[in-house]
Amino acid sequence: MKSEIRSGTLLNYANLLLRIGVDFFMVPLLLLSLGKSEFAIYTLAGVVVARLALCDFGLTASATRFLSEYRARGDVAGEAHFLGNLLALFSLGGLVVLVLGLVFYPFLGDVFSRFTPGEMKIFRVLYLMTLLNTALMFPARSLGGISAAQQRFRVPGVITAVASALNIAGTFALLLLGFRSVALTALTIGTGVFSLLCHAIYCFGVLRARVSWNGWDVPLLRSLFAFSLWVFLSQLINVMNAGTGNFLVALTQNTEQVTLYTNSLKVYGYYFLSAGCLTGLYLPRVVQLVVAGATPEEQTDAMIRVGRYLVVLLVGPLFVALFFGREFFSLWIGDSLGSATDTCWLIAVLLMLPQTLSLVQGVGWHISQARNCLRRRVLIAALNSGLFLLGGYAACRWFGIVGLAAWGIFTMITQLLMLNFLHYKMELGLQIGRFYRSIFSRCWLWLPLLGGLAYAVHVVLPLGSWWFWSARVLVFMSAYTAVMWWGYMSRQERERVF
């Protein structure tokens, strides 16, 4: 399965780079074609309905964990029975999403009262289209758990890449033909349906997944909901954190500020997702470790192994954002937003800095799931999310979107400290001190060296065009790769890469 994980990681990063490339070319085109106002509405409509998708109560994320456990125990009949109950639950979940979305629909004008009548008319159409698609696609959400539990990542990654390529080509074509946000949303829905159909064929035709139905299994459902409740609460809390502060911006500022904050979140969001490209593949292996009776020390070793690779993957982009990000935003969307791009850069960097310390602990989330120890973790996150919502609204209203980002930093750091001490150390018994010492070994040497290299490249090489910007980033990343390869990674870690 190592080859599947390696291939899955490469495909995940390829898909992520494809999405970044799409935003790189598409966002300026969308801004010019749709305008700041409709661009903000187009972005926000999908975000609103995505929050309704949380009505799966954490079942989507829980499916991989339970299926991995059945797979680790070799219980084929139990796996089929579980899938039958899961598909039935997802069908009911789709109906719940549709009903709740329709109930919320008449109140859209009250919630987003700053929208003009024309903006609200477009927003309502996009909202209904995305809502219907989300409800209809709900039963297919279990498919990702099937392939992940079997640690099959190649084909799903290829399917995702093909669907993304179709969406890119279609979007360019529609914009060139003069179509606007409604047509773009219809295209996204179509490529999503295509992707899900391909996943279904792969799971049931190639992986031979089986579904059996012998009626509702109440003890199984009770166990599933007891676990998924905490996953759901964790997802709900993540929605209320700094990553979705655009809701608070929409409530307190105008659509131009929503556009600024949204573009900041795009860069921050891709940085966040870059860690998940690696850690997202490790839940089945962590479940196998726990089922096999791994000690907290061995679980800490697993965190360290993945955490050190995450340091290599994250620190480079972080330095690029710090030293070259301001020019990137100016070149990227400066024609549409002007000097306001400095605000976009500042917010993105402010959010990325504290988040790095959390992202390198990504496997810790899987350990919490595998050991069914989510309660304390969720309560800690809930406390800090409450702080973010209460203080974030006031910060955004009085100090604007930069104030909102600054308050988000405070809540991120507070949550990280509480999770490390109260959850990882005291509850799970993980050796957090050893973890940080291991992943940041010799940081007193390589961090200042990298900072000096980035500053030298920033000062010496010229500015002013994409060619010069790309050359500066290429020079720095080449030096960065050499420093981390020989000055940070051990011989065993270098061998594992290949």
Image (cartoon, rainbow, N blue to C red):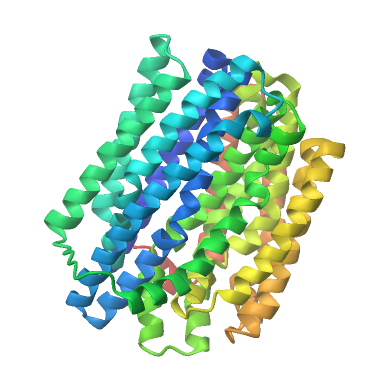
Determine if residue 7 is in view: no
Q: Looking at the picture, how far across and down is residue 122, in whole percent?
A: 53, 20
Residue 127 in the figure: left or right of residue 463? left
Residue shown at 38% from the left, 43% from the top: 135
Out of 261 and 109, give the one closest to the viewer.
Answer: 109
Residue 174, by quadrant, is: top left
Task: Please say if 395 is above or below 257.
Answer: below
Instruction: Please say if 169 is above or below 34.
Output: below
Q: Residue 248: x, y in percent? A: 71, 40
Q: Residue at x 67, y 25 (%)?
A: 330
Q: Is residue 473 left or right of residue 309?
A: right
Vertical comparison of 213 with 263: above or below? below
Q: Residue at x 53, y 72 (%)?
A: 364
Please tell me how many numbered marks the rendered image carries.
0
Q: Is residue 284 visible?
A: yes
In the picture, which quadrant includes the N terminus? Answer: bottom left
List x then y, in percent, for residue 218: 34, 75
Instruction: Tell me the quadrant of the picture where the C terminus can be found.
Output: bottom left
Residue at far right of view: 398
